[in-house]
Image (cartoon, rainbow, N blue to C red):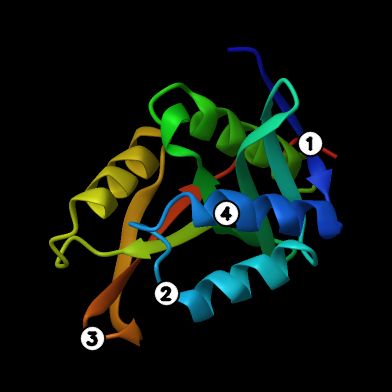
């Protein structure tokens, strides 16, 4: 395994990669309307891609809210590459990019612990392992059956 991280890029290539990887993760991305929204927005926002040789194995899309905060809008790693450091490398690259831009806070939204899904328990554990902390549960942002938790991480922007 020889992982190379590319980005940020903003183009249709990232949208196609996003679709391919999201389709390999139906346990996390099973709502077609949401998948199509992720795919569409991947072409309009900065994306970071993880490659193993010529194969895209992971991606992360950033959405800037304002000069001080950004969000991991969507992220995915194909199942064969879970627990191999790919997700951690994607988040690290995003943090470096955002720190250089002076961004102070990074957030991510995921399924809250009040939902029993074991896959999302792993997702929350991953984000905590890379430094995110729970901020707030918003049970109705998506719908009552899919309660949202916002997790945040303070970034230390580079001196300008």
Residue contact at pointers 3 and 1, CB within 8 angstroms: no
Using residue 99 as the reference point, say whether residue 153 is left or right of it: left
Q: Position of residue 25 (x, y in %)?
A: 43, 52
Query: Are dots 3 and 4 in contact, CB under 8 Å?
Result: no
Up-down relation of residue 122 to residue 80 (above or below): below
Q: Where is residue 127 in the image (x, y as percent from the top left)?
A: 39, 43
Per the image, the residue denoted by label 4 is 105
Q: Is mark 3 on a helix, strand or loop?
A: loop
| Residue 157 to residue 121: above or below | above
Q: Residue furthest top?
A: 1
The quadrant in which residue 38 appears is bottom right
Residue drawn 79% across the image and 39% down it: 7
Q: How crowded is mark 4: few (under 14 residues within 10 Å), some or many (20 or more)?
A: some
Q: Residue at 51% x, 56% y: name it.
A: 23
Q: Badge 1 local density, few (<14 within 10 Å), some, or many (20+)?
A: few
Q: Which of 27 and 109 is in front in this view?
A: 27
Q: How far apart are marks 1 and 2 (CA)?
A: 41 Å
| Between marks 2 and 4 in the image, the one whose residue lies nearer the viewer | 2
User: Mark 3 or 1 closer to N-term?
Assistant: 3
In the picture, the disc for residue 122 is none
Whether residue 104 can be seen here: no
Q: Is residue 68 above or below residue 158?
A: below
What residue would you read off at disc 2?
31
User: Foreground mark, 3 or 1?
Assistant: 3
Q: Where is residue 112 in the image (x, y as percent from the top left)?
A: 25, 64
Which of marks 2 and 1 precedes in the sequence? Answer: 2
Q: Mark 3 points at which residue?
A: 144
SS class, disc 4: strand
User: Which label lies toward us, 1 or 2?
Assistant: 2
């Amino acid at each position: 395994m020889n992982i190379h991280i590319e980005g940020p890029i903003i183009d249709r290539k990232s949208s196609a990669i996003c679709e391919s990887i999201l389709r390999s993760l139906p346990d996390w991305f099973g709502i077609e309307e949401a998948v199509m929204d992720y795919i569409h927005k991947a072409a309009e926002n900065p994306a970071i891609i993880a490659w193993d040789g010529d194969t895209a194995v992971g991606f992360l899309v950033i959405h800037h809210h304002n000069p001080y905060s950004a969000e991991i809008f969507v992220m995915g790693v194909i199942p064969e590459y879970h627990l191999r450091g790919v997700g951690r490398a994607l988040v690290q690259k995003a943090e470096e990019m955002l720190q250089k831009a002076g961004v102070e806070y990074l957030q991510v939204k995921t399924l809250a612990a009040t939902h029993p899904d074991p896959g999302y328990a792993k997702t929350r554990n991953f984000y905590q392992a890379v430094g995110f902390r729970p901020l707030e549960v918003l049970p109705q942002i998506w719908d009552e059956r899919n309660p949202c938790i916002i997790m945040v991480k303070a970034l230390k922007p580079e001196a300008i």
